[in-house]
Every structure is written in structure tokens, then in C-alpha cells.
Image: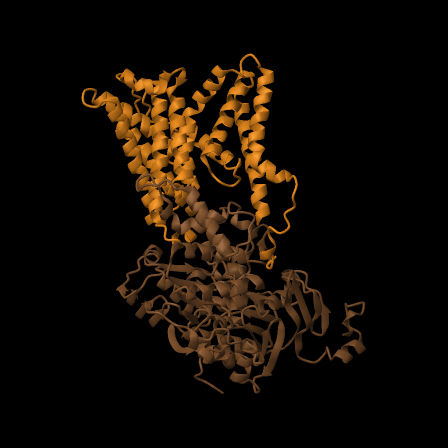
Amino acid sequence: MSASIELKGSERKPGFDLPAWLARFGTLASLALLLIIFSFARSDVFPTVDNLLNIMNQVSILGTMAFGLTVCLVMGLFDLSIAAMATLGGYVATFLLVQYPDTISVPVAVLISLAIAAVIGVFNGLIVSYLGISAFIATLATGSIITGAMLGISNSKTIITGIPDEFLIIGQGSVFGVSNPILIMLAIGVLLWLVLEHTQLGRHLYAIGGSAEASRLSGIAVKRYAPIALSICAVCAALGGLMAASVLGAGRPQGVGDTYLLNAFAAVFIGASSLRPGKFHIIGTFIGVMLIGIINNGLSIMGVPTYWQYIVQGVLLIIALFSAGLLTMRRR
Amino acid sequence: MSSNKVGVASPTRDEATSNARERPGVVLEVKGLVKEYPGTRALDGVDIEIRQGEIHALLGENGAGKSTLIRSICGASRPTAGQIFIDGRPVELNSPQEAQDLGIAVVHQHFNLVPQLSVAENLFLSQTLPRRMGVFVNWSVIGRRAKKLLERVGLNIDPWTEVSKLRPDESAMVAIAKAIGSDARIVILDEPTSALLPAEVSILFGHMRRLATEGHSFLYVSHRLTEVFEIADRVTVLRDGRRAGAWTREEMSRKAIIKAIVGGDKPWIEETDVSRIAYGESVFAAAALAGGKVRDLTFELRSGEILGFAGLPGSGAEEALDLLFGRSAVAGGHLTVHGKPLTLRSPRDAKTAGIALVPKNRHTESLLSGASVRENISLPNLDRFVSDPFARFIRRGRERAESQGVAAKLAIKMPGIESSIDSLSGGNQQKAILGRWLASGAKIFMLNSPTAAVDIGAKADIYNLIREIAASGAAVIFTSTEVEEFPRVCHRVIIFRDGVVVGELSGATATEANIMHLAVGDEDER
């Protein structure tokens, strides 16, 4: 046990390695399997371009939030405030538009609401970096504060009337038949993929997530990165909530983000079990998001009761994490 | 040896007499113990015997086999060959539980106590607790038993005190009480004094002495020779997995023990001819630097020089490297790099000044596990590959080319530059870490035990690499937990004791024995 340091790597057998293959492609394989099953079961409805766009439209809010969450999980930070942040994003934008219909235009309202989210995200990061409180707890606390503040400002009343039509375009418009939410999700995905894969910021986030001490000793100013990562995550969550408000045509002061919180984590963790086992990455997250969307869509098309969606999702999450864990366990 | 007879349960009379196994007073005897790990022989036929009521010191350098011996005695690892006798009876220890049932307990360096629990809870942690009505834990009985046990070891504290609130010597005694509470007759103490102040050490020794006169035996592992002379009835020294000597209290001499520890017959190879080294100008200097354990550190390092920071664990030698890299806070003094004053607030400041640190623990302090060799080499050097100051895209082609170049230059054995760093051997991982800093263009290299957990062949490579770094005009500060490395690697060695530099040796005088003498202190020379 204690003298096995020099042994690793030397005894890796060539040839097909099933656990390694499963860890890498297991999630993709199950995605393919589901696609095949659903396509055969409902060949008239499921395998169509319209339905694909429908699925992507359904997961666009989830996807936007999950992409942001990926950035902070790369660094090893859990952000539990994304639910409250999504609520904030939608409510603040509609609130501003209704309160100051003459002075604040739609783009300005959107920018202000995203900027508030960014500031709160930075604040989350400062708590984590400089007060030494774990992100898990810090974001739980700020999430609670945001929820309280929203309820206080709104008097628990949903904003329905007075929302300008330009705002509704965000969630309800489309370009060449592709809905705006899909385009927003894809744009955020591409942007964050570039950041994580091809910039120094991304590399440092991965390095800190791998070993904060090794990063610090390599001259990286580790404490600066939690505010950056958490504010990116917060902006994405607020954007998701904003899209939800636009789709609904209403600014709800509570509960908007709650439905997305667990699914976003599930998507990111399923993503970490595909292609690059044990690592969070944007493409993986996209696979996770699509997997969740396809399960929900496919099962409902087949007329399976809704509760099955939750059960299938939970089982898949465990299988995905287990198959990814197989490889990490063996590495030790 | 006749112990390979069958029917081990009770030794026959002639076996006992022929091997003198029933010598009165010998409670534990180890005979010809061998422990092999793949590629190494950690123990190569060790003998040791411990008598009733004696405090027996076990000495030796890191890697001499002390911890392997302890692990064998306490049932944590099974020896490859050899025999262990308890009260003259051969025993096989398959688990720590079996050793404990036979009266052997180990008190580790950090006392394996749970700091958030009370003393009483800790004392009975591993035992079945007394119950009321077979369900509820009877805390009043536990309190009474704890009190009694603490009295037995001479500790006058409330059993409900939280362990985190105890002084280090009190924690040590609680750990010993826990061992004795589980009916241990042989208590193994693994460097119990490393966290203790001198006054606390003497309190601990007082208690140990009294328990010894009551019949308990101690096997006491330490690095501190002075303490050994103070407390030990007998001493056994291990070197390279063998017994290098054993003395009773009357026979002990500092000279003989040090000679046994470092190996007096070991020829000292003059691998670095100091007289022929052409040093350059001063690149790194400290004046009266203080921080943490280190006090009043003054030195000057010239380009081309390899300076050793030697000392026992906790002496400040390793801590000085952390201080010089901005890893721990500087409390006073001045630093200059190339003649310019340097203020260190973080490792980032040190890196910017051209200082590199290769820390001791690869796995927790330097490797990016799960990342590729390329990413591990380029980690501190990404600034050089960014396309523009705003988006900071990384030009991966350049990054790969440079990492590849470093890997080739250091002859790192790997499947490819994109393969995971975890798939490399320890030696090649360490080369990648060194390569990371070579690529950074650092001019001052600080290396803490760079050959730890590295196989023999890679060790030589790393030694050569260190010499090449120095020869290329950089300066090196080297420290290690293995004293024998200093004469091999360094041009000059300064020796730390209790946070202060107590001496400097260079060239032919920088022998392992001389370093050791200064490191342990000579004030009570016999």
C-alpha cells in the first residue's frame, strides 16, 4: 500500500478497456439508446426537426443556467444561489420596465438586472475568498437573502400588466425558425466554451479546481478567481430567469429558479461523466442538458406519467456518476 | 533459527532454552525481521528486544526502516520473514486489533485523538461503552473510569475537557492513558515530542519514567538525540533496514550513535569539487529575516551556487523555504534579489522576482492531478502564450511546442505530452515540476526534498539536473529530510536548529556526520 507509488501506469494493458470506455462514452451511449428507443416508439412525432427544436427550446433556460454553473464547478465551487438569482433576474427586469416605463428601455432593464446579479456574484466570491466560508454555505445564505429581498420589494405580488412587448421577444421571438432562447443558450455555451477551453482565465479556473495550492505556488492569484467564477454563474442564472419571465410574460418574485436548481446540477454532473471523466466541461454539460430534455420530452410523448421523468433522471444521474467514478477509483 | 517448527501456540522447553526466549523481563523480541516492498527491502533482518519497564529509544534517518518496523510490531503490515515474540511466545500479528489484544499500542505523532470530543470520550472511543438498560450510554461510569485512568498516568484534568483545549503534553499523556487503558504493556511512541515545548517535554518524560517503574515498556521513536540521552534506558539505531547498533544507558555515546545513524563506514564521495566552482555575483540575500519558526536568518546566495538548508524536522530549514517564497508571513528582516529590495506578500511576488519553489509534497502542493503533462509544465508560464491583453486566448501551439521542448530536454518518459501527469512515474512527475520552473526562466530555485518518493535512477537524474541548473548560472537552495543528500548535492550547507542558523559547512567539511552534529546540538557532548 505504501510503496506502490512507482507502479502506476506500468501495468496498463492494451486492448479494449470496458470501464474506461463506459466512463468516457457511457453517457453518450445512453443518450443514443434513448434516441433510438423514442424514435422507434413514436417515429411519427419524436425524430423530427420540429421536435428537436422543441426539446432545445424546453431546455434553453436550464442550459443557460447549467453553463454558468459549469464555470464555478470547474473551480470547485458549488453555487446554490442560482435559483434565487434566476428569480431576481426576471423580477428586477420586469419591475424596472413597469415602474419606469418612460425612462428605462428593455436593453437597459436587462443590463441593470444582469449587472445586479454580477455584483451579487462578486459578493459571493468575496465571501468565499476572503472570509473563508465554503461556497456551498455562502451561496445558500445569499440565496436566502435574495429570496427575502425579492419578496419584500414585490410584496409577494407577481408583475403581469405593463410589460412591454419588446421584452417578450427575448423568450418568444425567433430567427429563421429557431427560437431566441435556443440562440441565447447556444451563444452562452459557445462563449463559455471559449473562455474555459481557450483562455488563460479558463486554464486558471481548471488549475485551481485541480489543486488550489499548486496554483498558488505557481504564482496564480487564487483569491481573485472565486468572484469572477461566481459572477459569471450569477449572470447566467439571472439571464435564465429573465428568459423565463419573458416566456411567461410575467415577473414572479418567487419560485422561478427553484425548478432549475437541481436539474442544472444534475446536467453538469452528468456532463462531468462524459468524454472527459471527472472533469466539468461545457460540451459535457450540453450533453447532460440534452439528456434531461430528451428524457422528459420522450417520456411525455410516449404518454408515460410525469413522475417517471424524475425517477429515470435520478437513476441516470447515479449511473453516470458511477461510471465516471470507476475510472477515478482505479487511478488511485 | 529454530522457530519454523510447528505448533507455535506454546513453545517447547528446548526451543525456549536454546533461543533463550524466556529471558526474564524481555516482553517483546523481534528476530530477523524482513519486510519487502516491490523493488525495495525496507527491513533487512532487524533484531530488537524490549524489556519490561524500560524506555527504549529507536533512532535512524528517514527511510532507515523505523516506521516499517513499528508497523510490523503493531500489526499494521505483515513482515516478509522473521519472528516476533511476546513474553517469549512467537506471535503472528495480522491486524492492529490483534496487536492490541496482546498489549501493544501505538501513540502516533499527532496522538490520534478526536479534538472535538472530550478526554473521557477519547479514552473509550474504541471500546464497548457501559450501558444503562442495555441501550443508553452510562456517562457517569465513563466519567469515573476516565478519572481513574487519568490518575493512573498522573494527569490531573477534568475528563470532560475537550481535547482541543489541552496543552500538547497533556494530549500526549491522554494518548498514552488511552493506550494503557486498553491494557497495553508496550507503548510505542512515534515522535511524541515533535509538537512539544521543552518544558512540556520534561513533564511528559516525568510521567513516562514513573509508568516505566510501574512495569510499562516504551518504544520511543525520536529525531532528537538530546532527548534520547535524557530518557532512554537503551537505544537501537536502524540504518538501511538493519540494526546499526544498540547500547545500554551506560554505554551510550553521542559520537557512536551519530556514526551508527549516518553510517561511519560509508565512503564520502566528493562529487562536487567546490574549489573549481566559479560563482557569479550575489543574486539572493537575506538579512535578519524572521517569520514563523525562523529567526534571524542571514545568508547570501551567488549565481552558480547550491546552498543547503539542513536541520532536523521542525528546525526551521524547510520553513525558511516557505518564508522565502512568500508562502508564510515575513515578520521582519530584509530580502534582496539582484541587489534590489524584495517584499513578499504572496508566492506571486516571489515568482515575479524570478524565484521558483519545488515543494516537498508533490501530490498536494505541486501536481495538477488529472491534467496533462503539457498543462503541468505550462502552469506558471501561461502569460507568455496569451494572444492579447484582454481576452487572453492561449496560443496552444506555442504552449505545446515549449512544453514538448522542456520534456525532451529533461528526458521525461511519457506516452505523450497530452497524456495525464498521473500516468508518469514519481521521478518523471518531479522532472515535469522542475521543468515547469525551468521554462519560467526563474533564476533562483528552491527545492524541498526533490528526490522524495522517487526511484534510484531518477534520483541521479534529478541530482544532475540540479547541478546543471546551477552551472547555467542560476542559484539553488536545497533542503531535504535525508541528511546524506547534502554532501552529495550542495556546495555549501547552513545548519538550522530551533529556528536559528547554528553553523555553516562547505567542501570537505560538509560531511553527513558534521551536519548531524550541528543539527542535533553538541552542548552536552559525552
Specify whether B34 is left or right of A187.
right
In terms of depth relative to the viewer, which is nearer, A259 or B518? B518
Which residue lies most toward the left here? A103
In terms of depth relative to the viewer, which is nearer, B493 or B158? B493
Residue B401: percent from the left, percent from the top? 45, 47
Which quadrant would the N terminus of chain B be assigned to in this image? bottom right
Residue B233: percent from the left, percent from the top? 57, 81
Residue B215: percent from the left, percent from the top? 60, 77
* Residue A137 can be seen in this image: no
Determine the image quadrant of residue B241: bottom right
* Residue B510 can be seen in this image: yes
Determine the image quadrant of residue A164: top left
Residue A321: percent from the left, percent from the top? 54, 37
Q: Measuring 72% from the left and 78% from the top, which residue is drawn there?
A: B22
Q: Measuring 60% from the left and 37% from the top, which residue is drawn there?
A: A21
Q: Measuring 34% from the left and 71% from the top, which residue is drawn there?
A: B300
- Check the rendered structure and report the hue given to chain A: orange
The correct choice, above or below, for A80 with respect to A247 in the image is: below
Which residue lies most toward the top here? A44
- Check the rendered structure and report the hue given to chain B: brown
In terms of depth relative to the viewer, which is nearer, A58 or B6? A58
How many numbered circles does the render carry? 0
